[in-house]
Image: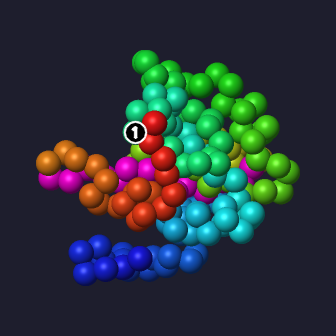
Amino acid sequence: MSTPNHPQPVGRTEDQPLPADGYAGDVTPQLAWQWVQAGQAVLIDVRCDAERAWVGYVPGAVAVAWKQWPGMLPNPDFDAQMRAAVPPGAKAVLLCRSGVRSVAAARRATELGLTAYNILEGFEGDADDNGQRNRRGGWRFHGLPWRQG
């Protein structure tokens, strides 16, 4: 959504994926949620277990960590968990903290034969000038469903 404080980038639309290299595309948090609500996509949270526990999570999202804490080592079960989470022919929308790890995870999911999209801005969005998140975009910033604790 474009507002005076958050202008919409040129060429970006809320209701269409943006092209991407190596995966199906990038979608806004709002479009990802629309697809999930309509049963058109599976929401995959690729953040580590600690992030979901401490920062918050989206009810109904499937947890498939790209990397695990501590150490942020690759999840050795990522491929099998993704295949189990996404039915044949379904779309997957991948969510991380800021929309970076989810790009790597979307590329890997695509290599597995899945139709995978990255959710722009992630769960918390980019850090502001004070190093604080949730003030410049992100799932929570846009008022989409989430829980903590």
Q: Is 140 displayed left or right of 65 in the figure?
A: left
Q: Which residue is mark 1?
A: 55
Judge whether residue 96 can be spotted in this image.
no
Looking at the image, the residue that sits furthest to the left is 130
Residue at figure coordinates x 64%, y 22% from the top left: 76
Q: Is 4 displayed left or right of 36 in the figure?
A: left
Q: Which residues are magenta?
A: 114-129
Query: Callout 1: 10 Å neighbours few (<14), some, many (20+)?
Result: some
Q: How many marks?
A: 1
Q: Is residue 116 magenta?
A: yes
Q: Identity of the amino acid at label 1? A: Val
Residue 134 percent coordinates (x, y): 31, 53
Above-or-below relation of 11 to 131: below
Residue 58 percent coordinates (x, y): 54, 49
Q: Is residue 44 magenta?
A: no
Name the quadrant containing residue 51.
top left
Q: Is 129 displayed left or right of 79 in the figure?
A: left
Secondary structure mostly taken by the magenta-highlighted segment of the chain: loop
- SS type, badge 1: helix
Name the quadrant containing residue 72.
top left
| Quadrant for the N terminus in the image | bottom left
Residue 102 percent coordinates (x, y): 52, 46
Residue at figure coordinates x 36%, y 79% from the top left: 2
Looking at the image, the residue that sits furthest to the right is 88
Above-or-below relation of 60 to 10: above
Residue 17 percent coordinates (x, y): 58, 70
Residue at figure coordinates x 28%, y 49% from the top left: 133
Which one is nearer the viewer's eye here, 149 or 96? 149
Residue at figure coordinates x 41%, y 56% from the top left: 140
Judge whether residue 110 can be spotted in this image.
yes
Which one is nearer the viewer's eye here, 59 or 18? 59
